[in-house]
Image (spheres, helix red, strand yellow):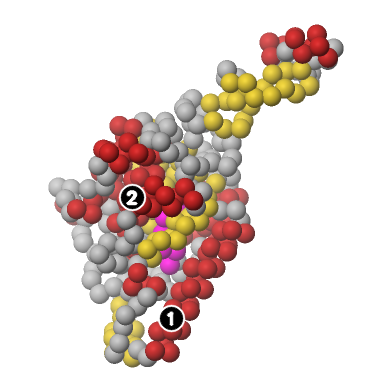
Amino acid sequence: MPDESPSLDFFDSAFLRKLETMAVFSRRAFAGRLRGEQRSNKHGSSVEFADFRPYSQGDDFRRIDWNAYARFEDLFVKLFIEEEDLFVYLLVDRSASMAFGEPTTKFDLARRLTAAVAYIALSHLDRVTVQSLSCEGQAAPGPLAVSVEAPPAPPNGRPPENHLAFVRGKGSIFTVFDFLRRLRPEGSTDLGRSVREFLMNHHHKGVALLISDFLSPNGYEDALKQLGFAGFQPMVIQVLAREELEPDLSGDFRLIDSETGLPVDISTTRRMIDGYRDRVRRFTGDLEQFCKKHNIAHLMTTSDTAAEDLVLHTLRRAGIVK
């Protein structure tokens, strides 16, 4: 049976209608299979005029503008805007560290953001793939996240598939909802390895939105560079729990790494907490600066932020939707 918790209800029809006025932002021209509602800047053969250029040997005579020839006594061909569908890849981190956060976990917010961006893309006839990222059972230390509880078991004891490939049309959003409901945060994530596996199986270039806490033991730089080098347009949403940014701890604790199970005994002091906060600020700031340097749309948010506000306002300012 699907999980019926309120955090998995996603969105009502009124909110979905608002999403239909938005579109996934694409800086590049990507080749698609079918004609959708996206406009790329690739010149093709549709009916929307774009520009002229001088005739070159081998050009189609049917595209010569004879009115321009009569005026300038030179041959020009007409260029048109080609209507193509956009491939949108939503890569959502479901490692165990994403199960952290109150009252909403990082993973639940990540799922809601994934669902919202998926519907925006589907309403424009884009092709949507949802890929979950997790290396189940692979021990890898995370720099920040802690947990004292094991993640819930998947329904019926069956592990979910890790991807939903190339759905299209608004009616497919219910398939996306069902897929996201079945996912559970578990294991660890090596973002570089996960992206390499993703690229091995997906060859159609497009927008790749990575939603994660980015607590990957081997860093995030390799993953984001690989997406860019492979011709994709990477985008980033970093989700952290409020408690990870502003811990309220006093006394002695045993912290359990949520992805390795390794314990760490600490006695908190003001100096320790201040040092931790400085490290977190450097961590989030370094990711922001990396994205800025590589022209990657970036947003950092906390799991207690309302998904509706993020989608309707913040994602547009971040350059993820328009």
- Whether residue 5 is visible, yes or no, is yes
- Whether residue 132 is visible, yes or no, is no
Q: Using the rendered view, name the quadrant where residue 27 is placed.
A: top right
The crowd level at tag 2 (other Cα within 10 Å; few <14, some 14-19, many 20+) is some
Q: Position of residue 92 (x, y in %)?
A: 39, 53
The amino acid on which the numbered mark 1 sits, given as a three-letter code, is: Tyr
Q: SS class of the residue under badge 1?
A: helix
Q: Residue at x 32, y 56 (%)?
A: 306
Asked if residue 273 is positioned above or below residue 105 in the image, the reply reads below
Report the side of 264 relative to 12 (left or right).
right
Residue placed under numbered mark 1 in the picture = 276
Q: Nearer the viewer, residue 93 or 278?
A: 278
Q: Position of residue 152 (x, y in %)?
A: 21, 61
Report the side of 49 relative to 285 (left or right).
right
The amino acid on which the numbered mark 2 sits, given as a three-letter code, is: Glu
Asked if residue 288 is positioned above or below residue 318 in the image, the reply reads below
Q: SS class of the residue under badge 2?
A: helix
Of circles 2 and 1, the one toward us is: 2
Q: Residue at x 62, y 59 (%)?
A: 293
Residue placed under numbered mark 2 in the picture = 308
- What are the residue bounds of the magenta stretch? 209-215
Q: Position of residue 56 (x, y in %)?
A: 78, 20
Total count of labels: 2
Q: Residue at x 43, y 67 (%)?
A: 215
Asked if residue 154 is positioned above or below residue 87 in the image, the reply reads below
Report the side of 303 relative to 127 (left or right).
left
Report the side of 45 relative to 251 (left or right).
right
The crowd level at tag 1 (other Cα within 10 Å; few <14, some 14-19, many 20+) is some
The magenta stretch spans residue 67: no
Q: Using the rendered view, name the quadrant where residue 256 is placed.
A: bottom left
Is the C-beta separation of discs 2 and 1 under 8 Å?
Answer: no
